[in-house]
Structure formats: C-alpha cells, structure tokens
Amino acid sequence: MAYTIDTHATIRELETAGIEHAHAEAIVTAISRADSNLATKADLAALEANFKAALESVKISILIALIAVAGVLFTAIKLFG
C-alpha cells in the first residue's frame, strides 16, 4: 500500500521540533524510500505459491531418486543374491 507525504511540510515540522535541516531531509528521504521496499500480501502470496511449487518439485525428485535406488538394490540382490 503506497502512501504519500508532504515532504516539505514534514521537513518543516521536524525542523520546528529541533532537528537540523540536513537531518530532517535525510529522515524524510528515508521514509519516502521505505514504502517502495515493503512486501504486500500479494507479494507474500506469490512467494508462497512459488515455494509450494518448488517443494512439490523437490518431493517428486526425491521420490524418483528413491525409486531408482530401490531398483538398483533389487537388481543387485537378484544378480548377487
């Protein structure tokens, strides 16, 4: 969720509270930039979906590997039994 602030007014409010101008500008810049780095519910849902898909892929790979190992063991037992 994006939000907007009146940067000039916020800088003035910070200066009125005793913060130096350069520091007030840095604070407002950081606040303005921070919103673009926030994760949204949609971001988290997409991440969860990707994770679930990757997990299923890993599960299938492990199952295939187990079947292959079982096949090798079965063959070894039959041959060298």
Image (cartoon, grey):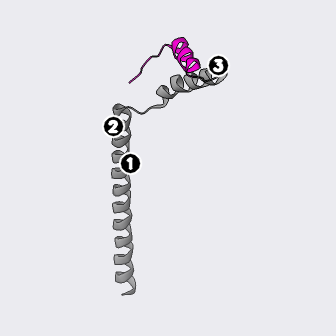
Q: Cα distance, mark 2 to mark 3?
A: 41 Å
Q: Quadrant of the C terminus?
A: bottom left
The residue at 34%/33% (across/down) is: 41
Mark 2 or mark 3: whose residue is earlier in sequence:
3
Look at the numbered discs 1 and 2 and tell me whether their residues touch, using CB distance below 8 Å. Answer: no
Q: Are marks 3 and 1 in contact (CB under 8 Å)?
A: no
Badges 2 and 3: C-beta atoms under 8 Å apart?
A: no
Q: Secondary structure at mark 2?
A: helix
Numbered disc in front, either 3 or 1: 3
> At 34% across and 77% down in the image, what residue appears?
74
Quarter of the rendering containing residue 43 = top left
Mark in front: 2 vs 3: 3
Can you tell which of label 1 and label 2 is closer to the viewer?
2
In the image, 36: left or right of 15? left
In the image, what residue occupies the spot 38% across and 40% down? 47
Which quadrant does the N terminus fall into? top left
Is 20 placed above or below 67 here?
above
Find numbered disc 3 in the image and state the secondary structure of the residue it sits on: helix
Identify the magenta region. 1-17
Numbered label tally: 3
Report the residue marked by disc 2.
45
Per the image, is 8 magenta? yes
How far, Cα to Cα, is label 3 from label 1? 49 Å
Q: Which residue is mark 3?
A: 21
**Closer to the N terminus: mark 3 or mark 1?**
3
* Disc 1 to disc 2, C-alpha distance: 14 Å
Quick one: 67 or 38, which is closer to the camera?
38
Look at the image and say whether residue 58 sits in the magenta stretch. Answer: no
Q: Amino acid under label 1? A: Ala
Viewer-nearest residue: 60 or 73: 60
Pointer 2 local density, CA inside 10 Å: few below 14, some 14–19, many at least 20? few
